[in-house]
Image (cartoon, rainbow, N blue to C red):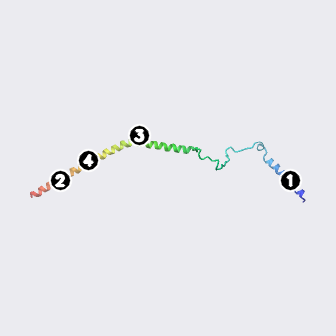
Amino acid sequence: MTWQRRSYLHQDQEDSDDENSLRRRAGVEGLIEIENPNRVAQKSKKVTQIEVDEPRQLSRREREEIEKQKAKERYMKMHLAGKTDQAKADLARLAIIRKQREEAAKKKEEEKKAKDAAAAAAAAKGVNSLSLK
């Protein structure tokens, strides 16, 4: 084969490739370019284009987390101040417990005094009975 014949054969193959590509894009594909609207091309930025000073937008989850933390802090402040229903109930329960403990301590002190007095009386009675014998 000569050079001219090779180039002619090569040219025929290129023409047939063009025809195949047109056949592949038959129908609507040949008329309309279809793109997936959900596919977002990643755009890369250069370091000089990035703005560090610009405030960053928070996601919904981050905003909700911050709001949740702030609400918890407000509740704890009110709870420590005794303004919440739970704090009022806790303080009332604590007052009742303190009163019960004070009463128990007084009762225990009275029993101890009575026991000491009885022991002192028994000791005094025992000394008197020993001296009489």
Q: CA distance from mark 4 to mark 1?
A: 117 Å
Label 3 SS: helix
- Find out whether the residues at labels 3 and 1 contact each other: C-beta distance under 8 Å: no
* Labelled disc at residue 120: 2
Residue marked by disc 4: 107
Q: CA distance from mark 3 to mark 1?
A: 90 Å
Q: Position of residue 57 (x, y in %)?
A: 58, 43
Q: Position of residue 125 (x, y in %)?
A: 14, 54
- Amino acid residing under circle 4: Lys
- Amino acid residing under circle 1: Gln
- Find out whether the residues at labels 2 and 4 contact each other: C-beta distance under 8 Å: no
> Quadrant of residue 63 in the image?
top right
Residue marked by disc 3: 85
Does label 4 or label 1 sit earlier along the sequence?
A: 1
Q: Is residue 62 left or right of residue 8?
A: left
Does label 3 or label 4 sit earlier along the sequence?
A: 3
Residue marked by disc 1: 11
Looking at the image, which is closer to me, 81 or 55?
55
Q: Which image quarter is the N terminus in?
A: bottom right
Within 10 Å of disc 2 (Cα), the crowding (few <14, some 14-19, many 20+) is: few
Within 10 Å of disc 4 (Cα), the crowding (few <14, some 14-19, many 20+) is: few
> Can you tell which of label 2 and label 1 is closer to the viewer?
1
Q: Is residue 79 above or below residue 117?
A: above
